[in-house]
Amino acid sequence: MKKPVSLFIVPTPIGNLEDMTFRAIRVLKEADLILAEDTRTSGKLLKHFQIETPMHSHHMHNEHKDAEKWVQNMNAGKILALISDAGTPAVSDPGFLLVRSALEAGLEVQCLPGATAFVPALVSSGFPCDTFHFEGFLPVKKGRKTKWENLVAKAETIILYESPHKIQKTLKEIVENFGASQKVSISREISKKFEEHLRGEASYLLQQIEEKPLKGEMVVIISK
């Protein structure tokens, strides 16, 4: 007999609220408790969709110590739903530790399909997406140089996440490590009103951004 699901991983919109699925809304309404990365951010989402399920914070600073507590709740029959501020939990966001703890306890975990930033950025880049390497955020300092050396050796399209105040540094390092003519695509504000995709050689994009700084979280695609 198939076990009932104790933990649902629920993707939430990365910008446009219309990207929320009917199933995601239903699961969040039926769950006993929602674990959210930031309850203030998620509170606005729940209010919009008239979801009244109780919510508790679950973020990078408490996920290590709280995982066992939530496993105990699930063992007691509670159904939990995990969401992040935007996108799919555990992808450059908290979630992995809770999923692993639940599975190790013999509980059933299910991840709903839904929004994640790198897929639309990759597909719309025009670069090969038959194989790719998802790196996410680069180390801020320690290990950054070694990480670039490893990425240069990759034969696949490379996917990075980057913040607006670090994008110039990252582009400079792409020029240094891959060359000025390296083809790059930058996607920002995906699914939002000011969604934008910049494509071209790394040196050209660097010049454009130096002249006109970009806002919003970004996905950087480096062509193989």
Image (cartoon, rainbow, N blue to C red):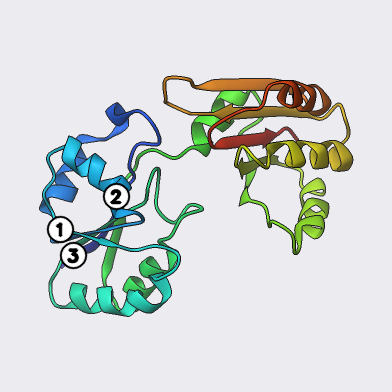
Q: Residues within 10 Å of mark 2 (few under 14, many from 20)?
A: few
Across and down, in percent, residue 215 comes to 57, 30
How far is disc 3 from disc 1 in space, using C-alphas? 27 Å
Q: Is residue 177 above or below residue 30?
A: above
- Circle nearer the N terminus (3, 1): 3
**Residue sitting at 63 percent across and 43 percent down?**
160
> Which of the numbered marks, if any, corresponds to residue 54?
1
Question: Do we see residue 131 in this rendering?
Answer: yes
Determine whether the residue tagged by mark 1 lies in a helix, strand or loop: loop
Question: Do we see residue 24 in this rendering?
Answer: no
Q: Quadrant of the N terminus?
A: bottom left
> Which of the numbered marks, if any, corresponds to residue 40?
2
Q: Amino acid at mark 1?
A: Pro
Q: Which residue is mark 3?
A: 2
Q: Is residue 131 above or below residue 111?
A: above
Q: Residues within 10 Å of mark 1 (few under 14, many from 20)?
A: few
Q: Amino acid at mark 2?
A: Arg
How far is disc 1 from disc 2 in space, using C-alphas? 13 Å
In this view, the residue in front, 68 or 55, is 55
Q: Nearer the viewer, mark 3 or mark 1?
A: 1
Q: Is residue 130 above or below residue 6?
A: above
Across and down, in percent, residue 57 comes to 30, 62
In this view, the residue in front, 145 or 214, is 214
Across and down, in percent, residue 26 comes to 14, 44
- Circle nearer the N terminus (3, 2): 3
Q: Is residue 44 above or below residue 59?
A: above
**Residue sitting at 85 percent across and 38 percent down?**
178
CB under 8 Å between discs 3 and 1: no
- Circle nearer the N terminus (1, 2): 2
